[in-house]
Amino acid sequence: MTRNSHQDAISEAQFDRLMKAARDMPSPYSEECEFILITAGRLGMRAGELCHLTPEWLNTERSLIEVPRHDPCTKGKHGEICGYCAKQAASAAEHDEDKTILDAMEQRWEPKTDHAVRAIPYDFDEALAERLEELVDDGGYRRSRVSVNRRVDRVVEAAGMDSAGIYPHALRATASTFHACRGLPPSALQSFMGWADLSVANKYVRLSGEQTARALRETHS
């Protein structure tokens, strides 16, 4: 049976434990792990998004991360395209006979889908917003996509937790669950997470039980 990432969302207590472990780690691992935890575990960003995030994506006046439709990748050696984007470009060229691999490489980085082009509000938590801006101003995530999983494994180990079910996409599921449990409506959750299908947001909201709890409170008040 296929296991869905929503099943691997971690609790708030577990997330707080990871954050504490990240802050206690030596630099630069501390900043790198904290950046991943915030952007994936609270802002719901995909690993490919968070590792390409630059200061230009941040609209500090409106407290938004504005994920662009295209942003030239310079995450590889000597400022060239990274291995992750090169692999994505090769796959795109393979499935489009009118596109050469060089054409595809010039289009990298780009989001996973059109719906992933979105504005992500981050001012729902003042401390988180302040720390995010500090980390991005300091350079954000300086390493490539392939290192994200290793950093997650490292902070999980530092926290003394079982790494079996904690990975970047599980952190994204954690963000979905976190906001659904606080009553974010499905349409807003869909926009926040960049999903193409509203049914995914409906599933998280349904599993959170928040709508049922709210209806019961209103009924019995």
Image (cartoon, rainbow, N blue to C red):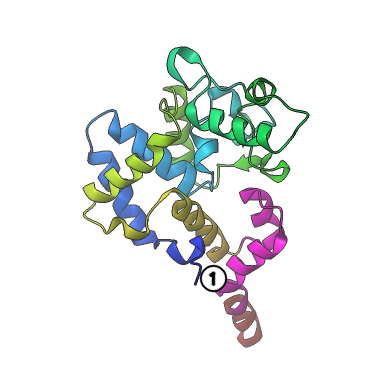
Residue at image point 49% right, 25% down = 82
Q: Position of residue 152 (x, y in %)?
A: 35, 45
**Which quarter of the picture shows residue 184?**
bottom right
Q: Position of residue 15 (x, y in %)?
A: 36, 55
Q: Which residues are magenta?
A: 184-212
Residue sitting at the far right: 98
Residue 59 at least partly seen? no
Asked whether 216 or 31 is in front, the reply is 31
Asked whether 201 or 100 is in front, the reply is 100
Residue 87 at least partly seen? yes
Asked whether 92 or 55 is in front, the reply is 92
**Which residue type carries mark 1?**
Ser
Disc 1: CA contacts within 10 A as few (<14), some (14-19) or many (>=20): some
Q: Position of residue 71 (x, y in %)?
A: 63, 24
**Which quarter of the picture shows residue 111?**
top right
| Residue 210, magenta (yes or no) | yes
Residue at image point 29% right, 54% down = 17
As helix, strand or loop, the secondary structure at mark 1 comes to helix
Q: Is residue 114 above or below residue 77?
A: below
Q: Position of residue 42 (x, y in %)?
A: 48, 49
Label 1 belongs to which residue? 208
**Residue 49 horizontal side relative to residue 15, left or right:** right
| Residue 42, magenta (yes or no) | no
Residue sitting at the far bottom: 220
**Residue 31 horizontal side relative to residue 21, left or right:** right
Overall secondary structure of the magenta section: helix
In this rendering, the count of numbered labels is 1
Q: Quadrant of the C terminus?
A: bottom right
